[in-house]
Each structure stands twice: as C-alpha cells, then as structure tokens.
Image (cartoon, rainbow, N blue to C red):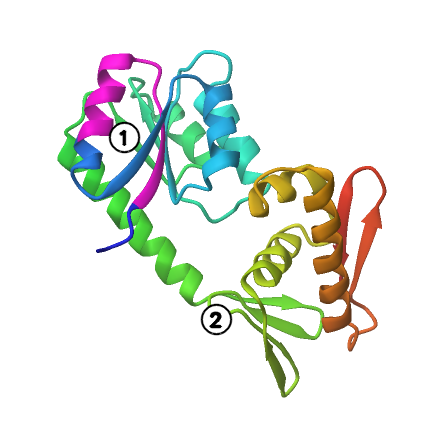
Amino acid sequence: MDKKIKLLLAEDEPSLGQIIQESLETRNFEVHHAHDGEEALRFYNEINPDVLVLDVMMPKKDGFTLAKEIRLENKQIPIIFLTAKSQTKDVLDGFNHGGNDYLKKPFSMEELIVRVQSLLDRNLLKVNQEKITIGNYILNYPKQVLTFKTDSELLTHRENELLFHLSQKKNEVLDRAFILKKLWGNDDFFNARSMDVFISKLRKKLQKDNNVQIVNIRGYGYKLIC
C-alpha cells in the first residue's frame, strides 16, 4: 500500500474545510485540518506534513504570516494559498510570502488535487537532486551519505535529519526546542541529552574540515559554522 501524503489544511470556514478534507482523503491524503493560524502552526510542528494548503484570511494568524514563519526554517515544503482575493497584488503577496501556488475561491476539488500533486512531484525531483555543501563536505540528503573528498560514510536517519536542519540554518542558530520536537517528538530532559549525543557524533564526523564547527549557543540551540 502506498504511503499516504500528509497534508496540513488551514481553513477557518468549517463547511469548506470539511469538503476539502473529505475530497483529499479519498485520494490517499492524510489530512490534518486546522481552523486558525495558530492551530495550523502547532499541527505543522507536530505532524511534519508533506504539503501545506493555507487559507489567507484566518483568525489568530493569517496564512501569509504563517507561511513566512514556516519559511524561516523550511525552504522546501510546498505551500498553496487559498483566497477569495483576486487582485494581482494579492497574488504577488502570496508568492512574496513563500507560496508556491495560489488558488482563487471558488475552485474545483479536481483543480486543487492536480495542483497539490504537481507541487509534490516538483518538490520530490528537487530534493532527490539535492546535494548540500558544508565546507569541504557534501551531504547527499536523500541517500543519507556524507562525503569528504573521496571518503564517504552512511549516516543514520537521525544524524542525517539533524545535519540537514543544521545545514538549512548555516551560520544561524537552530532553535533547540524546535528541533527536539521535530525529530524526537518533545523537548524533555531525556530527549535533550539524546540530541547532545547526536551532536557529538556529528562533530566527530565533521572534524576533517577545521572550518566546520557545530557550536552550542547556550539557552538557544546550535549553530553550524562553515
């Protein structure tokens, strides 16, 4: 059986949200429906979705603000905005806030499904081709392989994910609580100690390049310097 695609839907209109959710669930999507922007951000951190469908006008936090916050730590996830607005400026605002596509209400479920699938296919192609430079190292994220010159080693899943997130925030602080919740499920004491062990492992794997460091920013998180 094919793995279900995790989709986070943020739509404050209950009837429309239910229609979208039911339509997508018949197409092998696992839909998590948030009714406002704050709930959507909480769901995002909890479920690690594959794609986001965000209404622009929502209570507590609008779709543009939500997307902008998510883009600070995730440049890859596909985002589609839903809106009743139709002015060119509104469409441009959507793209400027990190959206990949923009669907004007009313729309057909078929059109939404086609656009979601198109973005997922495009994103998969991009990720599969992605090799990340970390100083003199190359991280092949899809294959979980770290290479230094002619030497390569296979990373564990958690090493790979942790190094990937550090690399996405090169020379910036990766928030400790965020990455604990993302990879370990919560930020309790025992998981924090476990993450420290993985950080130590990554430091050893990166020690061949003296210009690459993972430093501890006390009280905040970690920074990959390269």
Quarter assignment of residue 210: bottom right
Q: Name which residue lies at 52% across and 47% down.
A: 75
Q: Amino acid at mark 2?
A: Lys
Q: Amino acid at mark 1?
A: Leu
State how far apart marks 2 and 1 are (Cα).
34 Å
Nearer to us in this view, 115 or 39:
39
User: What residue did someone put label 1 on?
Assistant: 103
Count numbered badges in the picture. 2
Task: Please tell me whether mark 1 sits on a helix, a strand or a loop.
Answer: strand
Q: Tell me the SS state at disc 2.
A: loop
Q: Is residue 161 left or right of residue 50?
A: right
Front label number (2 vs 1): 2
Nearest the viewer among 188 and 16 is: 188
**Percent of width and height locating residue 74:** 53, 44
| In magenta segment, residue 13 | yes
Magenta-highlighted residues: 5-22
Rendering coords of residue 70 (x, y %): 53, 36
Residue plotted at (61% across, 52% down): 165
On residue 143, the disc is 2
Residue sitting farthest toward the front: 190
Q: Is the residue 151 above or below the residue 16 in the image?
A: below
Q: Nearer the viewer, residue 181 or 137?
A: 181
Classify residue 19 as left or right of residue 192: left
